[in-house]
Image: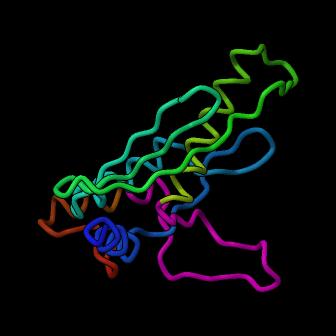
């Protein structure tokens, strides 16, 4: 298991804080496409991949090391019998699956989305990237022939 742990550790050192720049449902969050856009190239750089699948009443999230086949996984229950105002059962299920995928993947990879204000003190970090920031830096970096994911660029 040392290969996947080394790769995930290297990934975590490089991945930026992801801004919660999508609004909906009364709060702000980092949506899945924004998370994927930021993490996928960094995961590939470190030989990592992932998949998420509905498995009965759970979402199975697997992060794997491409070369060694080593993996880490988690299973998260999909809440049953939830009712949301203005949504039918299928919409509620789709919303729950998307929500769980976002947070299960973030948890398994150790992603930080925005600042943590749950504790008594507020954590601060130097690097925060939202989808628009990432797209702009990535485009400019490609045009300049540099790696936009380096700490001093983003």
Q: Is residue 2 above or below residue 61?
A: below
Residue 43 % position (x, y): 30, 58
Q: Is residue 89 left or right of residue 95?
A: right
The one nearer the camera, 154 or 94, is 94
- In which quadrant of the rendered view does residue 147 lie? bottom left
Asked whether 131 or 30 is in front, the reply is 30
Residue 101 on image: x %, y %: 56, 41
Q: Residue at x 58, y 62 (%)?
A: 113
Q: Nearer the viewer, residue 26 or 107?
A: 107
- Toward which corner of the image does residue 56 lie, by quadrant? top right
Is 62 on the left-hand or right-hand side of 118? left
Name the residue rendered at 38%, 77% in the picture. Answer: 13
Q: Residue furthest front?
A: 1
Q: Position of residue 73 (x, y in %)?
A: 46, 51
Locate the C terminus by quadrant.
bottom left
* The stretch drawn in magenta includes residue 58: no
In screen coordinates, is 118 left or right of 112? right
Give the residue displayed 63% in from the left and 44% down from the top. 76
Residue 58 visible (yes or no): yes
Residue 139 makes an appearance in the image: no
The colour scheme applied to this rendered structure is rainbow
Q: In the displayed image of the protein, which residue is found farthest to the bottom?
A: 121
Above or below — where is 76 with respect to 58? Answer: below
Residue at 47% x, 64% y is: 129
Q: Residue furthest left?
A: 145
Residue 112 among those drawn in magenta? yes
Q: Quadrant of the N terminus?
A: bottom left
Q: Which residues are magenta?
A: 109-134
Residue 46 position (above or below residue 36): below
């Amino acid at each position: 298991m040392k290969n996947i742990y080394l790769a995930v550790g290297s990934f975590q050192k490089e991945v930026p804080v992801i801004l919660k720049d999508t609004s909906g449902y009364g709060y702000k969050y980092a949506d899945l496409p924004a998370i994927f856009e930021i993490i996928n190239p960094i995961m590939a750089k470190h030989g990592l991949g992932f998949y998420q699948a509905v498995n009965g009443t759970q979402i199975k999230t697997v992060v794997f090391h491409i070369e060694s086949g080593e993996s880490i996984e988690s299973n998260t229950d999909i809440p049953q019998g939830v009712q949301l105002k203005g949504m039918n059962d299928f919409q509620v299920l789709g919303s729950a699956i998307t929500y769980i995928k976002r947070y299960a993947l973030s948890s398994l990879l150790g992603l930080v989305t925005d600042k943590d204000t749950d504790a008594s003190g507020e954590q601060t970090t130097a690097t925060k990237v939202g989808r628009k920031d990432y797209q702009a830096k990535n485009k400019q970096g490609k045009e300049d022939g540099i790696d936009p994911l380096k700490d001093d660029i983003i």
